[in-house]
Image: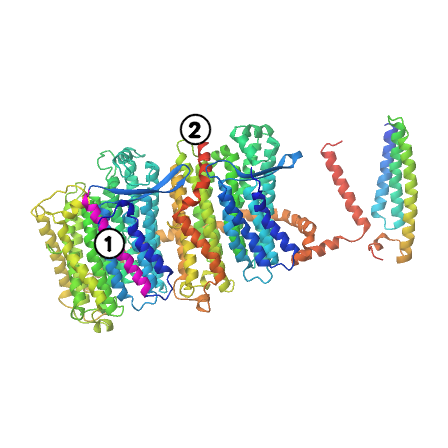
Amino acid sequence: MNELPLLSLLVALPWFGALLLWLWPKAPVRGLAFIFCASTLVLGVIAAAGFDPTRTGYQWTERHAWIPSLRIDYHLGLDGMSLLLVLLTGVVSPVALATVLRRLESPRLAALLFLLLQGAALGVFVALDFFPWFICWEFSLVPAFFLIKGWGGAGAGRAAYTFVVTTLAGSAGLLLAFAALYAATGTMNFVDLAQLQAEGRLPGLLTAVGAGVPTLAFVGALVGLAVKAPLFPLHTWMPATYAEAPPGVALFLTAVMSKMGVYGFFRILWVLFPADLRVHADLLLLLALGGAVLGAMAALRQTDVRRMLAYSSLNHVSYCLVALFAAAAGVKGHEVAVEAALSGALVQAFNHGLSASALFVCAAALESRAGGSREFARFGGVRAVAPVLAGMSGVALFSSLGLPGLNGFVGEFLIFRGVFGLAPWAAVVGTVGLLATALFLLTFWQRVFHGPPAGAAAGPFPDLDRGEIAVLLPLCVLMIVLGVAPGLITPWINPLVTGWAATLPMP
Amino acid sequence: MSPLHLCLLLSTVLFCIGLAAVLVRTSAILVLLGVELMLNAANLNFIAFWRYGPGGDDTGVIFVLFSIAVAAAEAAVGLALVIALHRHRRTIALKAANQLRG
Amino acid sequence: MTLSASLLWLIPATPLAASVFGLFAPRTARTLPIAGALLGLVAALGLSVAALAGALVDPAVRATSDFAWFTFGAQTLRLGWLLDPLAGFMCVLVTLIGLLVALFSTAYLRHDPRIGRFFGFLSLFVAAMLGLLVTNSLLLLFICWELVGLASYLLIGFWYERPAAAAAAKKAFITTRIGDLGFLIGLVWLHQATGSALFHDGGAGALDAPTLARLSSTLLPGGWAVSTAIGLLLFVGAAGKSGQFPLHVWLPDAMEGPTPVSALIHAATMVAAGVFLMARVFPLMAADQGLATVPFHALTGVAVIGAVTALLGAVLAVAQNDIKRVLAYSTVSQLGYMMLAIGVGSWVAAVFHLITHAFFKALLFLGAGSVIDATHHEQDLRRLGGLAGRMRVTFATFALGTGALMGLPFVFSGFWSKEAILHAAEGWTVSHLPFAAGLVGVVLTAFYMTRLVLEVFFGKARGEGAAHAEESPGLMRGPLVVLAVAAVGLGWLGLPNWPWLQTRLQGGDWPVHGLGEGFGLMVVSTALVLLGIGAGWWWYGRVKRTDARALDPLARSWPAVHAALAGRLWLDELYAATVGRAFAMLARVAAFFDRWVWGGAVEAAGRTAETVGQVNRAVDEDGLNAGFDNTSEHLRGSGRRYAKAQTGDAQSYLRVVAIGLAVVGVLLLWGGVR
């Protein structure tokens, strides 16, 4: 359809940058890394400009036979959801890279690994065949592992192992699921599988392989995605990892890699296993609510900035899943609620990426000024000595707790609008999470930023420097702009969401 | 039990003895002997299949002749290596020969 | 000149521009942010007056101007602006008091280095508040509602170095957010039930008659009408913002903010937003009134909570020693009166009282601010005293405000608006208890205000600050005088026999009756006011306090009662022990489960996986990644280990090959390959 292999370029450029860094020892590391890192945003914007929001289906597609004997294709494509997440990656990656490379003596290897990670994440968002998709999905763990282990805090080694091993265990489930799908259908292509499901033939084909196979495939895929997102209670790798990883990597993990899980929930579970999702919707909804409420509650007890942010991420991502599972149980007549819930989940995924990145950058700024300490008790009265830091983290914090006028509210409103229409009790329970979120974020704010300057802030405590402001300012501006005009991103996902809502079964 | 089976059994036993020798003996000469035993086990198989098999041509015999010739050459080279090793290290234990460089 | 509905957005936009200007100005800038804020307020005031003039041309007309916000799925979310007399009056009120408070603040905060920021926050507040008033959409109202909460948070915590201010700001935000969650649920429910985010939309809006008929005729399990449930949820939000029992606890603590903030936000305008919301959605609140079958009417709940709050606030104001806290509890009490009026069905009386109260309470707070400023931040009325002679203008205006708050007859505005509420409550058929509570509140109001005035302005100065107090500068006296004029005169707009304001607000006819009809009630309430003043005189006037440490006369008479009231009936402690502790407990349980139970389960699974992982690691790191040797110290180690496996012993290689062959053979046999 298009002459330019835009999506291939999109994925390959960061990898090419990594290759260049490897082969060219005297390279100007930071400049080179940033150029290739920012290529995603540029190409993402080009893709968005050429994207026709009125059409459903994939655009910018590329499909070539790869391993014909196994019917594996090199198949890339972009729909509204992918586009949204590609843009998110484009915005967040430079921020994360800047945070990773900040004050690093020899940035080459870290930059190289980060570019590998970025490319892998992009691959997950644009691949339409399970084979390349899964390669990227798994490959992303390798640079993440080395980044956490090599540049993390004291407990980083153990955290990195837990992270990789837990995720790998989940991936085994995914592999199993697709082995079953492949055995049943002879293809691993998302589009072809979705077509089979739309024609109603997929469950029959799966059952033909064996009696337990459909359940096996569903559970396998569910577990694999649930670990990544994460879905309560498979989140336990998260607090330690986010706390011990270098801040830039933790930022990328929560802003982009957790979205890989959410993306998978839509791309795989929602599309291929709607019936199973519907059957187990109540249980899953309960788990997601558990994540939203208990995550916020657990965050209340944390005194470590990044552990608190980790639980905050669990809370926010759980809202996406609450919306997804509530929508999964929807039937005809509830189209509006389902559209609201699904739009809310996607918008929330994007917005959480923005606000969580900003919060992690602020946490990194705090840490670097307190000699690496992340305890609340080491701070106090920061607002008086570092007003710019206070202002910007204030924007991020209020966005995160869903203040209207900032981006976080839009997703939350849509989610609650949708979930209330589908499962009112879940919406009511979910509000407890909102309250606890406000409570722990403001408690954090009060202890660290308010009061007389104390702890690290009592000594020399420089305000944000130019580099940090350059990183944070675009995020803050985006948070405000998207809070006022969410219509800038919703048109891309509207046809997708409407299409999903249209396939609801009769009551 | 047919003659073919007996022959195959014999060759299996020969092969296993040869293999054991190769894996456990320390002396290079005995290892070489083991290799010869394994080769001969294979030769025996060729002959047995030629004799009792359905075929009509002489492929098996020709293979065996080639094999014996190659084995003889190999034994000559092997023994030469053993002698070289002995000159160098004053021993013919294989463990001593763990370096590519002299 | 009038303002058309399509230009209504200009009203909040002008202060918003001023706030952006104020917040991004250099930190040390003073003049420019102040000038910007004042300019924004003046412009907004002009626009508001123009809008009000437009609205009064035909009060029955609601001018709307809607726009699409964004589209989700196939649904377009529409928001809009609305101009009716209610919005017009409220806009003028907010901008006028905002302007006066801003002028007052330029003097009050003259020594504060962050005064520029203050005006930025103040403009932000005014912008959000104006947006809240002129919106035609519950969603947009909610958005502005939260933004005024943000401004309130920022301004209460303006002196954030003080731990008490920081804590009070958080408490205010969290407590009102509890209410806001009810609001949010009500909002999404209303949107779900009506499919529209607009109030008035040519019959399709949430407050248009056909929609309301549908809402009140749809019944929930238990016989409740949907409109009742939504109305009560919205009232939860209003209760949070307007300091209604049991969510009133944040308002007295909010007095940690600068006094002008208390005057504008926590007395005159923001806290009245709940009352405004109830007035705005009154058709929805009253939709279930005609239904005999529903077990509970939304307005009944409002009336009960309003009456309880009116009484509770007045009772708690009696024993406070902080001049601002007395006024804060008084605000709680007066807001209770307004809610009571809404509950008994007279939203017009509520808005009338809202308007008069805004002026006289702003006056009282600014008067208190004048006292505090003159006495070098002395707020404890036990250490004040004798200021009547030293601060004549402040005393005179404060006394006028006190008269209005007590409801001294005929002259003062508070009298007429309070009478309107009591009159409505008297006629309420469901119960007479709210009316009774209102009457008791009148006595208490007169009592605590008498005490306040006597302690602050009479007797002898009992502290350093009070002894050397001098009258405040002109920039502070000016707003006081203007407000005092309003506190006296505004009541004349809504006389029973000339209900100009009521007619305009209602947008239609309003029953005109002579002064004679409610005369009996007026006599009774006047007698009650005099009773309160007399009691106040009895305790605090006969023998004036001479020593700051002397026991409160009330405490000498009734120690137990006084202790209970001074302890605010221990409601804060009760919340801390119940809700607070339950929340903390839940948090502890969640954290515990997270660490030990889920964590433990995953840990156990993880250990198993780790064993596998170790094997995996051996292969992965020693085998596959050997090429990365020079890239990491860790891998260099594994490289060495790999080198160890490379013994050079031909036999051990052969052994590995043999084992491998055997395994492959077994597998092939097992797999049935022949």
Residue C208 horizontal/vertical position (percent)? 26, 37
Horizontal side of B88 relative to C335 (left or right) equals: right
Q: Main secondary structure of the magenta part?
A: helix
Residue C139 horizontal/vertical position (percent)? 33, 44
Residue type pointed to by label 1: Gly
The magenta stretch is C31-59
Which residue occupies the foreground of this view, A120 or C331?
A120
Residue A250 horizontal/vertical position (percent)? 52, 53
Q: Quadrant of residue B60?
A: top right
Query: Exactly how many numbered labels are in the figure?
Result: 2
Q: CA distance from mark 2 to mark 1?
A: 57 Å
Q: Residue at x 78, y 53 (%)?
A: C647
Which residue occupies the foreground of this view, C550 or C643?
C643
The secondary structure type at the circle numbered 1 is helix
Q: In the rendered image, which residue does mark 1 sit on?
A: C46
Q: For residue C77: magenta? A: no
Which residue occupies the foreground of this view, A402 or A105?
A105
Q: For residue C36: magenta? A: yes
Q: In the rendered image, which residue does mark 2 sit on?
A: A506
